[in-house]
Image (tube, rainbow, N blue to C red):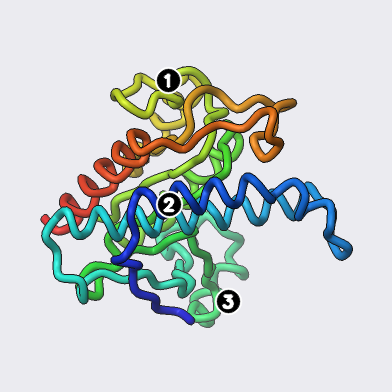
Amino acid sequence: MVKTGPDYDASLEHIIQEYDNYMAHADSDAKLQTNRAPSGYIRHTKGKLVETITKKMAAIAWLQTGGDRNQLWFDSRKIIIPIKQSALDKFPADVASYIRTHSEDFIYKFSVDIHVFIQGRFAVGIECKSYTEIAMYKRILTDFSLLKSQYPTLRCCLVQLENQLGEGYDNTRAPSIGSPSGRTLDSYFPEVQIDVITLLEGTRGVKAPIHEQRYGKPLTKDALQNGIEKIRQNLTAAQN
């Protein structure tokens, strides 16, 4: 299904229960897989878990804005990025000539994890990760930069379970300065301005996967409330 509505019955308790249930069974479920590697299964399902949590946080945040329940939805259709006509003069003459004649064929289709629509307008884009390290962050900046070329007022968010971006992104309570490498990349994409939301405390331990019970981290109401508030701010700003 392309268009889906938010789960307005979502609550902090239900989100935490869903997270706890996943973490309690993820390791054993991964070891039972016969058609894919356990690591691949964990990576895929953990990413889907973050998407599910984020959509429920968005539903709660939208209700907090007082918004009409029928005016917000998620749409998974790919976004079409047309070739940049102003750059064709830099191409070889014969290539540029062909592209100008067939420009409708020269497009790039892609999406981020969650497209939030408000009253039919693509308002907030959200990328979801179990963790983010700096190379991933660079790609996310590029993706949002492409989206902003078509939707200049788009608000951009990154929701991650754990932080691997460096010091500053792991504090879910206070505004952070961010890591030197992350802020350096930000300076080359001034139009993007990603709001990073981290749900679990501390920095990701490469050798301490949280789906193993001995390394588990709790998802707290406090962290969810802070994430919901950041999403609410973006939804509110997207309407102005």
- Is there a contact, CB below 8 Å, between mark 2 and mark 1? no
Would you name the residue on which mark 2 appears?
15
Q: Quadrant of the C terminus?
A: bottom left
137 versus 206 height, above or below? below
Residue name at image x 44 percent, y 62 percent:
84
Q: Position of residue 159 (x, y in %)?
A: 44, 44
- Can residue 193 be seen in this snapshot? no
Rendering coords of residue 197 (x, y %): 39, 38
- Nearest the viewer among 198 and 145 is 198
Residue contact between numbered discs 3 and 2, judged by CB atoms under 8 Å: no
Q: What's the residue type where badge 3 is placed?
A: Tyr
Question: Of the numbered discs in the image, which one, if any, rests on residue 98?
Answer: 3
* Left or right: 137 as drawn, with respect to 230: right
Under circle 2, the secondary element is helix
Q: Looking at the picture, which amino acid does disc 2 mark? A: Ile
**Residue lying at 56% horizontally and 37% vertically, measured from the top left:** 132
Residue toward you, 240 or 25: 25
Tell me the distance, in whole angstroms, between the alpha carbons under discs 2 and 1: 25 Å
Q: Which mark is residue 75?
A: none
Mark 2 is surrounded, within 10 Å at the Cα level, by few (under 14), some (14 to 19) or many (20 or more) other residues, namely many
Q: Amino acid at mark 1?
A: Gly
- The mark nearer the N terminus, 3 or 2, is 2
Give the labeled residue for mark 1.
Answer: 168
Q: Secondary structure at mark 1?
A: loop
Q: CA distance from mark 1 to mark 3?
A: 48 Å
Residue 81 in picture, x, y percent from top left: 45, 67
